[in-house]
Structure formats: C-alpha cells, structure tokens
Image (cartoon, rainbow, N blue to C red):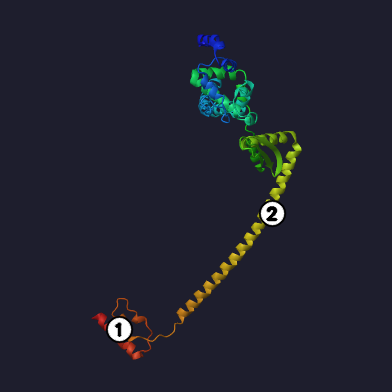
Amino acid sequence: MFITDFIDRVRLPFRKDKESYSCLYQIMGFYPRNIQYYKQALIHSSSAEKNDKNRYLSNNERLEFLGDAILDAVVGDIVFQRFKGKREGFLTNARSKIVQRDTLNKVAQEIGLLKLIKTSHQNNTHNSYMGGNAFEALVGAIYLDRGYDCCYEFMQKRILGKYINVDKLAYKEVNFKSKLIEWSQKNKVTCDFELIEQSTELSSPTFTSRVLIEGLEAGTGKGYSKKESQQEAAKAALAKLKKHPEFIDLIFQTKGKRTAMEENQAFCLSDESVTTSLQTTDDRLQTTDDRLQTTDNRQQTTQNPEPKTKNPELTTQNSSSEFDLSDISFKEKKQSREDIIAAAEAAAFSENA
C-alpha cells in the first residue's frame, strides 16, 4: 500500500484533479485509486451540477447507504475489541452514539469534509445532516476503492484517535428525553412534549418543541427534526431542574393541587355510586316483596280451589290410565256405621281365607 501511495504522490502534479487528491489525502491519509467514487460521495442530492453530456451527476445517496452499513460494522468491531467483557446492550449503545448524526456532523466539520460537498447555495449552511451523510458516503467510497481493512484503519487511526473520544462518548448520557421521562415517572409527575412551531421551508425545515411538567413549561428546543427538538427541550428541562430547586418545589405544589382535585372528583363519583347502589337495593327489595306477595296468593289459591265441574269423558279416561287420580277426588257420599262394620268383617274374612 505504501508503494502505491508513493507512486500516486509522484504522479499527482500531472493529474487533472490535483486539488481533489490533495484534499482527500489530508482527510484520509492516503490517495484514492478511483477518484470517481469520492467525487460521487461529495455530491449532495440538491446539487444541480451536470456532466459533459448535460446530465445531472449522480449524488451520494447510494454511497451513503453503503457507508452506513460499513460504518456500523467497523465501529461495532472497534467497540467490541475496546470494551472487553461489556454486555451487548452497552456495546450497542456505545456504537449508536459514535455513528449518530450529531457526532458525524461534527467530525465532517472538523476534518474539512463539509467544505468539499457540492450542493445548492440555499442548502449549503442549513442542512444539519449534510455533513454526516457525506461522511457515510465517504466511508462507502473507501470500501469500494480499498476494502474493509482500509475502512477499519481509517476510522481507528484518523477519526477515533483524533476527533472522537470513544471512552467518554460511550459512558455519556445523550438521551435527555428518556432521562427526563424516567425522572417524571419516578416522582409521579406528568411530562408532555408539544410541537409549538415548524418552519415552512420544504428543503430543510426546522422544528421547535417544548416540554411541560405538570403543565409548567420546563424547557424549549429547536432542531431539524421533531426528535432533535424534543431532545434539546428535554436537555434544557434537565438543566433547569438541576439549577433551580424552586422550580421543583413549584412542580410538586402543582402536583398536590392536581391530586387533590382528582381525589375530590373520585369522592363525588363514589357518592353517586353509593346513591345508585342504594336505589338499586330498594328496587330489588320491592321486587322481592312483589314476588313474596305473588307466592302467598298462589298458596292461598291452592288451599282454597274453586269447585270444578266433572267431565264424564275425563273421568272415564283417567280410570283406565296408569296414573289414576280418582281415588283422591272429592266424595260427597257418607257411609253409615253398619256399612263400615260390614266392610271390616268382609275384609277380615277374606284375609283368613
């Protein structure tokens, strides 16, 4: 690799793209083999530059896609080797902090990559993700031009060793929103995020959000996405909670008023429930009394049945039936004493026989 770089350096003054080679060498520490990869990596999607055939040049979005994947692998490899014994969650968190847009944007600014990006004038200073996207595209170009090992060496020696403090960043708390929500849940106070302003510029809109704790404004933040603005608002809220203890007192005073009001509402609802329950009980008791009255009427009707006219046809039919009820029907005829004695003697005679 050293011999190839030396030959490229000797031939450099005779090349057409001498300035591009020199700038890239200052950033990467080596000369490109195929300059076209790097040219494409530095063309933003907003660029209106055309080639000799009057066609728009290909932008860096495809190389950005490739570089994003390679960067995850390279940084994951470095973090894995650096933090031996750490769990998967810590390694994932450390890697995400290194490859996040804010970190890559700062790196692109510090290494001078931002100045090389070809873009329209109106987006040159406003698009916050342009530098980070170009850096990922640069890594994709290095991978196509030199391979994975060169990408690893570039990140290890040129970037992480100079512009990113891996140890400090890995243990740094950057998710301010998550930390604020955790604090609010622990103290049982409400925490809400609201979008209060959004710019109408389509190319690179800005968002302004605020965070309310118990309805009190705790902080505002501005960013180029809703998520970024919420993170900034949460960061301001945490700083306010840390520096102004009187604001915390105000939060808990407001919380006390809210909980007292909720308890009063719950008490009123409880009274209504008791009244409804008593009314329901009275209705049930009344229904029970009605049922008991109906049962008494039925029993009285059973004890004093109305006389029924006998139907000869039914009597004949019942007498031949298996369940004959004629023996328990009402009998009007009364037996005399002589008839009773005669019947008893006849029965006794028949038993002795």
**Image x and y of residue 220, in percent:** 69, 38
Q: Is residue 234 left or right of residue 336?
A: right
Camera-side residue of 321 and 206: 206
Q: In this view, does 244 lie to the left or right of 101?
A: right
Query: Hey, which quadrant is residue 281 in on the image?
Result: bottom right
Residue 259 bears which disc, if any? none
The local secondary structure at tag 1 comes to helix
**Image x and y of residue 123, in percent:** 63, 31
Query: Hey, which quadrant is residue 191 in on the image?
Result: top right
Q: Which of marks 2 and 1 is nearer the N terminus?
A: 2
Up the image or down, 147 lies above or below 180; here it is above
Q: In this view, does 264 lie to the left or right of 296?
A: right
Which residue is disc 2 drawn over? 264
Which residue is disc 1 drawn over? 316
Label 1, residues with CA under 10 Å away: few <14, some 14-19, many ≥20: few
Camera-side residue of 202 and 163: 202
